[in-house]
Image (cartoon, rainbow, N blue to C red):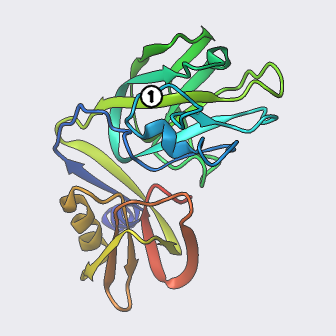
C-alpha cells in the first residue's frame, strides 16, 4: 500500500535531477509581461532586450500606465535557477526617481496564472534607486519567474519605469526540478515539439533530457507528447479530459 501511495504522489508531482551550470544573464530576450503598458514602445520586452540603453524616448524602457497603483514586471527565465543577483538599468533621459521602494520576488510557479503561487524573497529594496545597480539577493533563491513589484506608489504619476533588468543565477549540479500536474488540461502554445511517449513519465523525461523544455502536454489516448519550449503570456488553456499537463505555468 505504501508503494501505491508513493507512485500516485510521483504522478501528481514529478521530480527529476538535471546537472548543468549557467551564470550568464538569464533574462535577456525571455518572455516578459507587466501589470499595464503605457505605449507600444514601452512594452515588457523592452526591459529584457539586452540593449542597456536608458532612453525611454528612443524606445529603451518599460513604462506602466499612469494610475496603476500596484505596478509589477515579470520575466520568465524558461528554466529553474538559483538566483543570486539582479542588475537594473534605470531610465536616464528623465524621471529616474520613479524607481524606488520595490520588491524582487522569485517564483517556481507562474504568479500571473497562479495567484496563490508562493514566492521567495530576493530583496526588499528601500529608498531611491541609482542609475544602475547590482541588487544582490539576501540569500540565493530558487525559481523560474522573477517579479519586480513596486508596492509603494506616491501618486498616479509614480509609474514603474526602468530600461533593463538582468538576472544572474546558476543551475547547480544535479538540481531538482519539480513539475506539478493539471489534469484534463492542455496549455495551447505555438512553441512545441510533438513526439510519441508510452507514458506520462517518459514524456516528462523527454522534456528533461531536451535541455530546452519547461513543461509537457500528454494525451494518454493517442500517446502524443508535446514538449513546451517557450510559453508566452498570450497562450491559452484548453480543458480536455484526454490531456494532462505537467509544468509550472498552470495551477
| Horizontal side of residue 143 vs 155, given as left or right | left
Where is residue 154, by image quadrant? top right
Q: Is residue 129 above or below residue 2?
A: above
Quadrant the C terminus occupies: bottom right
The answer to whether one can see residue 210 in this image is: yes
Identify the residue shown where x is 39% and y is 34%.
51
Identify the residue shown where x is 79% and y is 26%.
157
Q: Is residue 138 above or below residue 192?
A: above
- Mark 1 burial class by Cα count in 10 Å: few <14, some 14-19, many 20+: some
Q: Is residue 44 above or below residue 25?
A: below
Residue 221, position as x, y percentages in the image: 38, 91
| Horizontal side of residue 29 vs 105, given as left or right | left
Where is residue 238, by image quadrant? bottom right
Q: Nearer the viewer, residue 171 or 134?
A: 134
Q: Nearer the viewer, residue 231 or 97?
A: 97
Q: Nearer the viewer, residue 180 or 217?
A: 217
Identify the residue shown where x is 45% and y is 55%.
248
How many numbered discs, if any? 1
Q: Which residue is mark 1?
A: 53
Q: Is residue 169 above or below residue 109?
A: above
Residue 207, position as x, y percentages in the image: 26, 64
Residue 122, position as x, y percentages in the image: 47, 23
| Horizontal side of residue 169 vs 67, given as left or right | left
Amino acid at each position: 500500500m505504501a508503494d501505491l501511495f508513493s507512485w500516485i504522489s510521483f504522478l501528481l508531482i514529478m521530480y527529476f535531477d538535471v546537472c548543468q551550470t549557467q551564470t550568464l544573464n538569464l533574462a535577456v530576450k525571455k518572455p516578459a509581461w507587466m501589470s499595464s503598458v503605457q505605449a507600444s514602445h514601452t512594452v515588457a520586452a523592452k526591459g529584457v532586450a539586452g540593449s542597456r540603453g536608458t532612453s525611454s524616448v528612443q524606445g529603451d524602457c518599460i513604462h506602466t500606465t499612469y494610475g496603476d497603483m500596484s505596478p509589477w514586471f515579470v520575466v520568465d527565465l524558461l528554466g529553474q535557477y538559483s538566483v543570486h543577483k539582479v542588475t537594473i538599468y534605470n531610465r536616464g533621459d528623465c524621471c529616474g526617481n520613479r524607481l524606488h521602494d520595490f520588491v524582487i520576488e522569485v517564483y517556481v510557479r507562474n504568479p500571473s496564472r497562479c495567484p496563490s503561487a508562493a514566492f521567495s524573497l530576493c530583496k526588499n529594496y528601500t529608498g531611491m534607486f541609482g542609475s544602475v545597480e547590482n541588487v544582490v539577493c539576501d540569500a540565493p533563491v530558487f525559481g523560474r519567474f522573477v517579479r519586480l513589484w513596486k508596492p509603494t506608489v506616491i501618486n498616479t504619476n509614480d509609474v514603474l519605469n526602468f530600461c533593463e533588468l538582468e538576472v544572474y543565477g546558476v543551475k547547480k549540479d544535479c538540481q531538482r526540478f519539480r513539475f506539478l500536474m493539471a489534469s484534463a488540461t492542455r496549455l495551447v502554445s505555438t512553441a512545441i515539439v510533438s513526439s510519441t511517449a508510452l507514458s506520462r513519465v517518459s514524456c516528462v523525461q523527454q522534456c528533461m533530457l531536451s535541455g530546452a523544455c519547461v513543461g509537457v502536454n500528454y494525451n494518454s489516448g493517442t500517446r502524443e507528447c508535446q514538449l513546451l519550449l517557450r510559453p508566452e503570456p498570450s497562450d491559452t488553456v484548453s480543458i480536455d479530459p484526454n490531456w494532462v499537463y505537467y509544468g509550472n505555468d498552470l495551477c
